[in-house]
Image (cartoon, grey):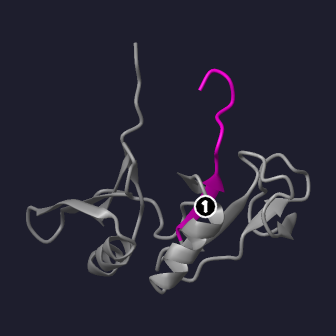
């Protein structure tokens, strides 16, 4: 049986501020639906993604800003970083991990600049939404076998 991840819920404290932020990234606004003051759902989708993001009022009991390590896969991490910075988003410099395999939580092990060989899966940049939910660009130009 196929199982597809299609929606990720991100906890936010201010729905309108989050909506402005994500739409300002160039993400498509799919829905903004409410049924009273205690329930509102906003759905946005990053360009080219089959997975959408939902946030709102009454959709999550998680603490706003508690999500970490959501990955946005890009073909060119340098260009993706420049695009977001051009939209006024505070985005980290491009980095790779000292171990060369995957990045660690937080900023531990970050080495400035992309992976020296520009190997797929090894170069990153990160940014946070206004609540502190963390997003990571990961550069993938060639998929591992089986993907």
Which residue sits at x=13%, y=72%?
A: 37
Of 104 and 116, nearer the camera is 116
Instruction: For mark 1, give the secondary structure.
Output: strand
The residue carrying mark 1 is 136
Q: Which residues are magenta?
A: 133-147
Q: Position of residue 21 (x, y in %)?
A: 37, 77
Quarter of the figure with residue 68? bottom right
Q: Main secondary structure of the magenta part?
A: loop
> Does 27 appear in magenta?
no
Which residue sits at x=77%, y=66%?
A: 95
17, above or below 106, in the image: below
2, above or below 66, in the image: above
Of 123 and 60, nearer the camera is 123
102 on left or right of 22: right
Q: Position of residue 62 (x, y in %)?
A: 45, 60
Which residue sits at x=60%, y=60%?
A: 137
- The C terminus is located in which quarter? top right
Q: Position of residue 107 (x, y in %)?
A: 78, 69
15, above or below 77, in the image: below
Looking at the image, the residue that sits furthest to the bottom is 88
> Does 143 appear in magenta?
yes
**Circle 1: is it few (<14), some (14-19), or many (20+) Cα within 10 Å?**
many
Q: Position of residue 110 (x, y in %)?
A: 83, 66
């Amino acid at each position: 049986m196929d199982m597809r991840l299609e929606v990720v819920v991100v906890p936010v404290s201010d729905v309108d501020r989050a909506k402005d932020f994500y739409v300002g990234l160039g993400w498509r606004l799919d829905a903004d639906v409410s049924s009273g003051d205690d329930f509102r759902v906003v759905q946005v989708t990053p360009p080219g993604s089959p997975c959408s993001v939902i946030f709102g009022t009454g959709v999550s009991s998680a603490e706003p800003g508690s999500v970490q390590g959501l990955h946005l896969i890009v073909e060119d991490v340098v260009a993706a970083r420049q695009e977001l910075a051009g939209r006024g988003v505070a985005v980290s410099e491009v980095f790779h991990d000292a171990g060369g395999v995957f990045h660690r939580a937080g900023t531990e092990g970050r080495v400035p600049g992309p992976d020296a060989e520009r190997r797929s899966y090894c170069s990153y940049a990160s940014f946070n939404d206004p609540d502190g939910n963390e997003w990571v660009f990961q550069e993938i130009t060639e998929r591992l076998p089986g993907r």
